[in-house]
Image (cartoon, rainbow, N blue to C red):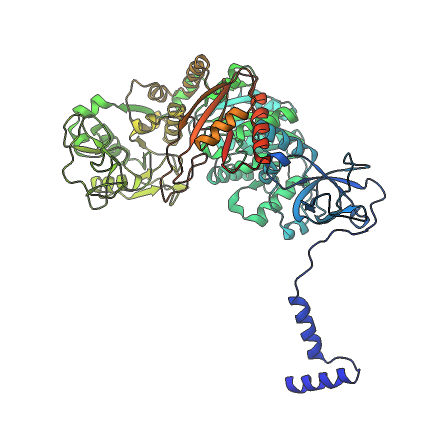
Amino acid sequence: MSGENGQGGGGAAAEGGPPEQLALIRESVRRAKAPRAKPRTWRGAELAPELPVARVLVDKGVLHLDRYFDYAVPAELDAEAQPGVRVRVRFGAGRGRVREGRREGGGLIDGFLIERLAASDYSGPLAALAQVVSPEPVLGEELLGLARAVADRYAGSLADVLQLAVPPRNARAEQRPSPAPLPPPPAPEPGSWARYERGSAFLESLAAGGAPRAVWNALPGPEWSRELARAVAATLASGRGALVVVPDGRAAARVDGALTALLGEGRHALLTADAGPEKRYREWLAVRRGSVRAVVGTRAAMFAPVRDLGLVALWDDGDDSHSEPHAPQPHAREVLLLRAAQDRCAFLMGGWSCTVEGAQLVESGWAQGLVAAREQMRRAAPLVRTVGDQDLARDEAARAARLPTLAWQTVREGLLHGPVLVQVPRRGYVPRMACAQCRAAARCRHCAGPLEARDGGALGCGWCGREESAWHCPECGSFRLRAQVVGARRTAEELGRAFPAVPVRTSGREQVLDTVPGAPALVVSTPGAEPVAEGGYAAALLLDGWAMLGRPDLRAGEDALRRWIAAAALVRPQGDGGTVVVVAEPSLRPVQALVRWDPVGHAVRELAERAELGFPPVSRMAAVSGKGEAVAAFLTAVELPGEAEVLGPVPLPPSPAGRPARPGAPPSGEHWERALIRVPPGRGGALAAALKAAQAARMARGGHDVVRVRIDPQDIG
């Protein structure tokens, strides 16, 4: 048949008749395979009759191009080329490429149409808009103003911030209409908010349309997600929108479930990376269109375009997940503070612990403390006991096994009534070793690298790989070793041998558990990965506390206390037998704050010390890192404010080979230096502007060596 059709088709074509069916199919296939033409310059096209100039932000995240560019609007794009839409433009053509009064050439690049103008300030010829990608307006005035404020705050470019704020387009999601908005719900009852001294008044103010600002020290237990849901419901009852940012998907799922149980389906959107690009963009569009007035999400949701914003809330602001790793690396806390000031809305920052930044907001009078009475706190918190160095020295069991006697007894008694949580400062199996007597780090005799205990029990170097069979401590002469920090998997194995009849579960980076049953079990977890137990844990062990306290970082004590309290808050109250054992020196301030369950007092004292020493957050600080010559040249060129103080530069620790570098760390194999620049309160804006101008000038000159600038770095040593 194909042969007949082919012959017939050829004869018909030769005779001038209509082509046969096979020829039509072949022509269709040929056209389908031909590449589609790219959008081209509108050569001689008629311009829009009104407002023929479009001001465009091109998607170029380089500082010396952090400004708007003017383009001509062809008449054919007049209706779709509205402020806020995505466009494509030609960028990079010089003045010499002008034809019929229009600039041509350059590469196609994405951008956002900011506004339409009657005339341009630019005296030369304008290139025309090449394409309106979508008529959907995704960049409103409020979001643009917030993105510009964040870019200025962090010495970054507006294009980089918008990459974080506006999700990638999904055509299928844009074509689906968003549901109609629901009417405001009734104001909720205070519920568990009544446990706090100003809790009921806070909800009443939200429901009445007020803008209270509070730093909330949440009581231990699972009620925090339901309390956040009530705050959102009270804001919706006033006819306004609400935004809640949490550190991870597990916390977002808990608040999502609490909101659904309180208000039902369709009143809020969940914005997390786990949703996938299409669903996430569809939810984001529902918020942008006004169909949904409440948002719960992780870090990226801090830019969610909620209409009539009445409340911004942040849970556990000390979590590292709230710090964006991509340029310009904004922190969710600072973005929400900017939104609260820009929209004049309510602000709620809560957690089981309290950061120094939260204490500063209360001390300055900008926010009020939202805490429970001491009697209420004692009823909700578990009993906390400590095991210090002197206890370990007298404890024969601690020298021979993983658990001190007190911890072993606590585990045994807790397993009679439910699951027991064991927090280990790190994941994995291979531990670094140290002298059991003086705790000096065990080093290789050949290269001075760290010695590690491997799976088979052999001792080897983590740098050169040589095995070590006759180690002794050069400091005290001892031949006994101990693990500096034993990983979660190794701890699980040792606990499994100590309690052979009890199931052991692990939760860490490889597999994070969300919940565990209320039956007796040992749950070994790294910080931040602790699952929630049904009915609460009967007991908890916080091992190797000195490892977290000994980190060479300004926030080591604050961060250790936050991680301990986050684990202890999952334990049953003291009245129900809940007990926590922390293996750390009891005289240290973070340990004492845990025993008294007083994170607010700890944060206030830390704030007073940092104010005396001029450390953040009292001062504003920036980190400049790169190769030594590049950093020195940058510091010479930048025009810093007169009050600025430069600390360093000092060498940065090299990044380990074969592992991804941490944010701000040098690439593997490169030796970098870092300088810290400190200014007093009120001069942070001037510092950011000076660093941004110097970085833009360096990029315009074509500097090849990388110089990274970060405002308010999380880790400053």
Q: Is residue 603 above or below residue 491?
A: above
Residue 13 drawn at (x, y percent): 75, 82
Instruction: Tell me: 400 left or right of 590.
Output: left
- Horizontal side, residue 564 vs residue 247: left or right: left
Residue furthest to the front in view is 96
**Point 66% across, 65% down: residue:** 34
Quarter of the figure with residue 535: top left
At a point 21% along the width and 38% down the height, the residue shown is 446
Image side of residue 669 versus residue 200, left or right: left
Q: Quick check: can you spot residue 223? A: no
Q: Quadrant of residue 18?
A: bottom right
Q: Is residue 7 left or right of residue 673?
A: right
Q: On the rendered image, what quadrant is the N terminus found in?
A: bottom right
Q: Toward the viewer: 415 or 679?
A: 679
Whether residue 533 is situated above or below residue 47 in the rendered picture: above
Q: Position of residue 447 (x, y in %)?
A: 24, 37
Viewer-nearest residue: 308 or 19: 19
Residue 684 in sight here: yes
